[in-house]
Amino acid sequence: MARRKQTDELTIERVIQWAAILSPGQRRELIDGLLALDELSEERSDRTPNPNDGNGGGTGRGSIERKTINGCGPYLYLRYWSGGKHRSVYLGKAESD
């Protein structure tokens, strides 16, 4: 039986392999960002509005902000705290309402 050809598919294993080459500080920032996303997912399933419904969402580690830039967008950004700094990560364009 032929082996499956490795693809560029994103898997948990590939993310962990990638994280293994990060510095300890970079891994801590990654963990903080993932915890913020996880917390937002749990809140959204309970009571937090969808980030496509307005600005923000979440009250703990982070929030998702909708942003319009030069009349384009809206774009979603994860905002969270890591290492005493407020971080921002682009998540992609928001789905159409």
Image: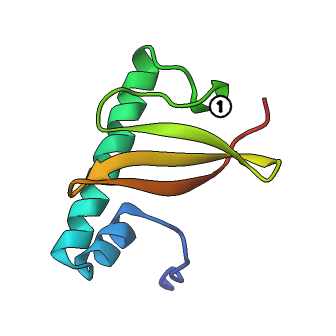
Q: Depth check: 71 or 43 in front?
A: 71
Residue 49 horizontal/vertical position (percent)? 54, 20
| Image side of residue 21 versus residue 45, left or right | left
Q: Secondary structure at mark 1?
A: helix
Q: Amino acid at mark 1?
A: Asn
Residue 5 horizontal/vertical position (percent)? 54, 83
Q: Residues within 10 Å of mark 1 (few under 14, many from 20)?
A: some
| Image side of residue 45 versus residue 59, left or right | right
Which image quadrant: the C terminus? Answer: top right
Q: Depth check: 50 or 60 in front?
A: 60
Residue 42 horizontal/vertical position (percent)? 36, 27
| Image side of residue 54 versus residue 22, left or right | right
Residue extending farthest to the right is: 71
Q: Which residue does the image show at 76% across and 47% down from the upper left? A: 73
Q: Which residue does the image show at 55% across and 76% down from the upper left? A: 8
Relative to 45, does residue 7 appear above or below in the rendering?
below
What number of labels is visible? 1
Q: Which residue does the image show at 50% across and 38% down from the upper left? A: 64
Q: Quadrant of residue 62?
A: top left
Look at the image and name its color scheme.
rainbow
Q: Which residue does the image show at 16% across and 73% down from the upper left? A: 24
Relative to 38, does residue 75 appear above or below in the rendering?
below
Relative to 64, does residue 85 appear above or below in the rendering?
below
Residue 3 horizontal/vertical position (percent)? 47, 84
> What residue sits right under mark 1 in the picture?
52
